[in-house]
Amino acid sequence: MFRDGLGVKNRNECDFPLYVTCKDDIVTRIDLSNQNLNGTIPSAISLLTTLEHLSLWGNIIGGSIPSEIGSLTNLKILDIHRNKFTGTIPSEIGALISLNDLEL
């Protein structure tokens, strides 16, 4: 459930069909592309173990790509290009054994 800090109370993550795709109430796709988002990708991304598609391209996301992204072993598409990332690409991305499309 989202918390008050996001301005949403008592909502399920699957209640945002334009941005989140779910299968049996499990998040499988997040597409927040070209939304002018800033900040960083939190290490808690690793909790989304059922995620198959993560698209965050065309934002202003900065900082480093968290190494925890390597725990998303169901990920087939990772599209995070056209952002403001710094640092090196984490070697843990090599653990994404289901990955078919990688755009950095």
Image (tube, rainbow, N blue to C red):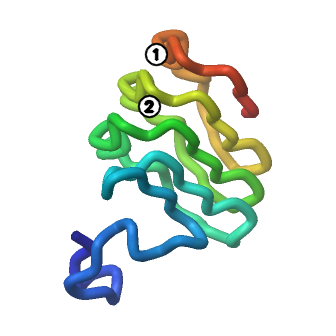
Q: Is residue 103 left or right of residue 47?
A: right
- How dense is the environment of label 2, judged by Cα within 10 Å: few (below 14), some, or many (20 and up)? many
Q: Is residue 3 left or right of residue 84?
A: left
Q: Quadrant of the C terminus?
A: top right
Residue 44 vs residue 18, the one in the foreground: 18
Q: Is residue 96 left or right of residue 26?
A: right
Residue 93 vs residue 39, the one in the foreground: 93
The residue that mark 2 highlights is 69
The residue that mark 1 highlights is 92
Q: Are marks 2 and 1 in contact (CB under 8 Å)?
A: yes
Q: Amino acid at mark 1?
A: Glu
- What SS does tag 1 mark? helix
Q: Amino acid at mark 2?
A: Ile
Give residue 86's quadrant in the image. top right
Give me the residue at 46% from left, 11% from top.
Answer: 95
- What SS does tag 2 mark? helix
Give me the residue at 23% from left, 87% from top.
Answer: 9
| Label 2 – label 1 distance at C-alpha | 7 Å
Give me the residue at 22% from left, 70% from top.
Answer: 1
Q: Earlier in the sequence, mark 2 or mark 1?
A: 2
